[in-house]
Amino acid sequence: MRVFFNKWAPFVLVMFMLQSGFGGNIESLSLGSKAPMLDAKFKDISGSELSLSSAKRENGLLVVFSCNTCPYVRAWEGRYPELASKAKEANIGIIMLNSNEARRDGGESLDDMKSHAKENGYLDKSGKPLFAYAVDKDHKLADAFGATRTPETFLFDKDLKLVYKGAIDDNSKSEADVKESYLKNAIMALSKGDDIKTASTKSIGCSIKRL
Amino acid sequence: MQLLMKYSFLKMKMVLLCFVFYEGALAKNDFPQLLDINSAKFWELVKHHQNQKSVLVNFWASWCLPCVEEFPHLMELKAKYKDKVEFIFVSFDFENSRENALKFLHGQSMMDVSYLNVETEQEFLKSMPESWSGALPYTMFFSKKGKQVMAMEGGQSKEEFEKYIRITLSQ
């Protein structure tokens, strides 16, 4: 019996891991799935509370998992105001969430988010946020979405079904060298009622700091 | 008094000389070395070790907290399994944090060549397994025959790494 166990245990363990998707990786929300936790409330940098339902507009909703400290967010966030403006033009709501619960005392608190928004162009001239930037307490929404990194985006249609997920575009390092603006293209297609050509992409990012 | 001042000045000069020497050593990239890599070169590198050793690949960045937390475990295991497992480290630091990556590797007493991705992330990700969402750190294990045995996203403990190394070696 012991010989059998010693010989086959690694094989059984490997098979189990392969079945469970390689070492406990998180499963991302599938395309076509309905947005979860629609009525859960999130406190944003303006002090108000909002939900996915309240953030949604006529043509859909864009959810972005972001933060203050990730270099990949820092590389991409200069493009956030334009994205917010495109989403607004397309009558799509937008909400950015900070799920880094394990780093609330390391630059990811609500106060840090307020300062970050002020210093990085998240506000208009009158000091009003261009988009909602809210705390995802205990990373509950990130867990429900299967979000793994920052920045990571999820675009929903008017019925709140997922139509695009992944990267903002194909070049974090240089906006001038972007060849494909995945998210912007998806927003445009969604607003026109066209098919979204690239519905899922990947990107390198900072892992969400879960408890 | 004059002698004391002269001695202090000499001591300051020596400290400065040591500092310049240390910085110079880092600048010259004697060790650790951080060589540029893209996805094509990366897969060539993995293949190069086929039939000789199992391979553990770790994608990391100096600014990534779970990456730097798990790195010492990997360094310990690298020393323990040096004859059986080749450890390949690929950093996703940006060019402007290359020096930080080098300093971190220096602090970890890395005495081998490491790599820094210079391709756009999208290009690099195209050749990577579906299981990698792109979050760092990410670790892959290849058997001696070159087959990918498993892969893990997120920080791991030393015990977990060692468990997966043993499984890889058994393949």
Image (spheres, coloured by chain):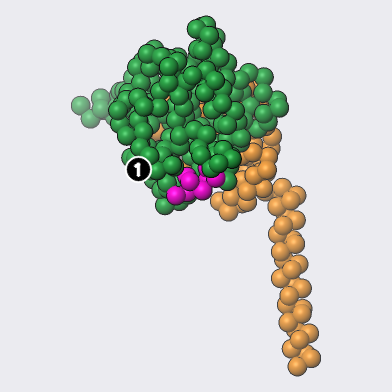
The spot of residue A177 in percent (x, y) is 70, 25
Q: Which chain is green?
A: A
- Note whether B49 is above or below A192 in the view shown: below
Image quadrant containing the C terminus of chain A = top left
- Can residue B44 be seen here? The reply is no
Q: Is residue B101 left or right of residue A111?
A: right
Front residue (pair B20, B147): B20
Helix, strand, or loop for circle 1?
loop
Which residue extends farthest front?
A126
Check the residue under mark 1 and report the chain it is in.
A
The spot of residue A135 in percent (x, y) is 39, 40
The spot of residue B152 in percent (x, y) is 43, 31
For image coordinates 77% across by 80% down, the residue present is B9
- Magenta residues span A111-118
Q: Which chain is orange?
A: B
Magenta stretch, main secondary structure, is helix
For image coordinates 63% across by 51% down, the residue present is B103
Residue topped by disc 1 = A211
- Note whether A21 is above or below B108 in the view shown: above
Which residue extends farthest left?
A1
